[in-house]
Amino acid sequence: MNFKSYKHLALFVGGTLFGSAGLKLLASDDAKKVYTHTTAAALRVKECAMTTVNKVQENAGDILAAAKEINEQRAAAKAAAEEVVPETVEAEAAQV
Amino acid sequence: MKFKILHECRNRLRVQAVQPRMTMDQADRLDSYLQRLPGVTRVTVHDRTCCAVICYSGPRADLLRGLAKFSYETCSAEDAAAVHSGRALNRAYEEKLVGLVVGKAARSLFLPSILNTAYTVVRAVPYVLRGLRCLLRRQLRVEVLDGASIGVSVLRGDYPTAGSVMLLLRLGELLEEWTHKKSVDDLARCMSLNIDRVWLKTGEEEVLVPLSQVRVDDLVCVRMGGLIPLDGVVAEGEVMVNQASLTGESTPVAKRPGSQVYAGTVVEEGECVLQVKQQSGSGRYDKIVSMIEQSEKLKSTAESRAGNLADKLVPYTLAGSGLVYLLTRNVTRALSVLMVDFSCALKLSMPLAVLSAMREASAYHATVKGGKLLEAIAQADTIVFDKTGTLTYASPVVAQVVPFGGRSEADMLRLAACLEEHFPHSMANAVVQAAKERGLSHEEMHSKVEYLVAHGISSTVEGEKVIIGSAHFVFEDEACTVPAGEREKFDALPGEYSHLYLAIGGELAAVICIADPLRREAAAVIRTLRRLGVSKTVMLTGDSERTAAAIAAQVGVDEYHSEVLPEDKAHYVTAERARGRTVIMIGDGINDSPALSAANVGIAISSGAAIAREIADVTISASSLFELVGLRRIAAGLMARIRSNYRFVIGFNGSLIALGALGILPPASSAMLHNLSTLGVSLRSMTNLMELPESLEALAQ
């Protein structure tokens, strides 16, 4: 006999084994426990990912708010500086 | 309750509740508690991270004290909000969105390319099938173009392009579905039942009880203009009921003893006693949702036009692609043209723009029941105001009680309060309030009470006919007389108040003078509206000529009419519409409802009569009339945005087609650019149209 027919025989035997014992193993309670734990872990991963996304969103919001405040403060400081200049000009004009 | 401050900025605070996890219910409670704290402008609570972001305008110390006092047990969320807050919906869609993006990234990074390709092919099949089905029905619509571009990419072996096109299409669809569901959800929540007390009939008496204490088979009394609180069967009386909030049709239905009435419908005429058959209505929420979905008001004409245009452009795109192939004999160039279609951008971004505008309007405490109405508000050139409750605060006060015929002030006020307390009119409330302040208690000493719209109330007390109402009703309709010798007292009545006349047995017994202060911002609002393009402002009121003239001069309306009956208000509005003007009507009482339905857009004050709220297309909370200005600017902004969307979509995609036809852009790039621009336009349509102003008065600028 040559190796090719061995290969076919091996595939046939493997298939029968899988169909009878293998499926039973996959559907057994122990296997179910494995599936449940895996699914639970996957859901935890999902929750963790969503929480991370939320955290990133919140931090982005913080940064945006702080940046806006910085700009506002600079604009206010600039406006205050510009107000001083006309006042001094008027004071000088009054003196003259 | 302990909180930790995570980030602080001027007027913005982010705190984290010190607890391992937060349920959605707890998040809702925290949200409603924080929103009720004084000085807080905006609150967002994230249940996953147990964080709350608070924007405030008052002193920081007060806010911190309010936070420290919070605890979940003592704070109970409002029933409706707790049951149907949008939090669960948002959560589900956020997960879908993140899942889509992360899934795509994970697949392209980790999955072996064979599996990736197989996955892409499998996902492409539904799109291609949908396109084919459309073709078989001899319709050339957007699905055909989508199917064509994806199918062609797969056939060419260009799997990354097919994958990215599908991702962007799915993102767009998800965004639209989310926004649509959220809008309908928000709208339904606003339109849900929110009455808390009803008149329970026990024996021969009526008692005001909270809604939660009503049981099945109890008898509840509902009068004209009132809202039917629970599902039931009519036990006594005949009424005309407006079931617009349930079925969408505005013609009233007659109900006789034995017929079924539904929660949330409004009694237009008559009064009845109904026997409660179902205790609380959460089924009503679902009914409202289905009604909104089916209503045609939700979709604006601009949206439908965009959708039709999108479908009409499909054959041109296909033809253009074919033309390029014929002219250049270059398949790549033809494909570059095929990948670009105006259509999906138009179909996606327009509904998003309209729905976002409706959401933005709710930030101004206005509930807009459909996209068509925003269009009408933008085009309106006439605004008709009701006086009481709209231009004036809805809280008039009794200034003086002038008794006639030797009777005492206290008795007359007591009698008036006893009659007036049954009716939801602001003048009635003033009388009842004045009696309460003077400590005058009034048991129900009258028999059947009859209310004649815009005229007055009549009843019988101890055998004598008692009527209370306007001058027209008391003197002309019922022919009552001033007691002998008191003519001068009558003529000397102060003129700046509104007068309520009380007559017993055909003779004038007392005149109640009611002061109705004008809203501070009324004149400024009318000026601003005029500047925003409303050419005609009108005031219609049932009040006397004297008071109406004074108010009109103060407020600055272009036209006013006094002593107007409800039907005349409706006639006026219809006449204006017949002249080709677009009319907005604003009112709050029962007597405004015919005019509200006759106008292009009917706006009701949410604290007014139930029937006005149900019939109107828009409800505003009217803590300040500047909300009207906000509405108008949002509507104008929406129209501008729709136009700019058109320009951008057609311009950008047109240039993409030109570049593709010239061979400068390969199909992958043109597909990518087209889809990114579509997503970009859609996302931008979802942003706010105006910056949220510091205070409503700032809208006057």
Image (tube, coloured by chain):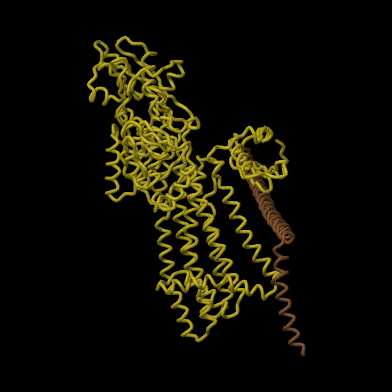
Observer-nearest of B486 and B529: B486
Specify whether A90 is left or right of A41: left
Note whether residue B112 is visible.
Answer: yes
Specify whether B590 is left or right of B655: left
Specify whether B600 is left or right of B651: left
Give the percent coordinates (x, y) of residue B77: 58, 37
For the N terminus of chain B, the quadrant is top right
Observer-nearest of B654 and B455: B455
Relative to B649, say whether B551 is above or below.
above
Q: Quadrant of residue A90?
A: top right
Relative to B441, say whether A65 is above or below.
below
Q: Quadrant of residue B261?
A: top left
**The chain drawn brown is chain what?**
A
Residue at 52% of width from left, 79% of height from top?
B335
Give the percent coordinates (x, y) of residue B625: 45, 38
Residue at 54% of width from left, 62% of height from top?
B172
All told, the count of numbered labels is: 0
Give the percent coordinates (x, y) of residue B232: 40, 37
Q: Quadrant of residue B226?
A: top left
Note whether residue B665 is visible.
Answer: no
Q: Colour of chain B?
A: yellow
Give the percent coordinates (x, y) of residue B255: 32, 38
Observer-nearest of B555 and B114: B114
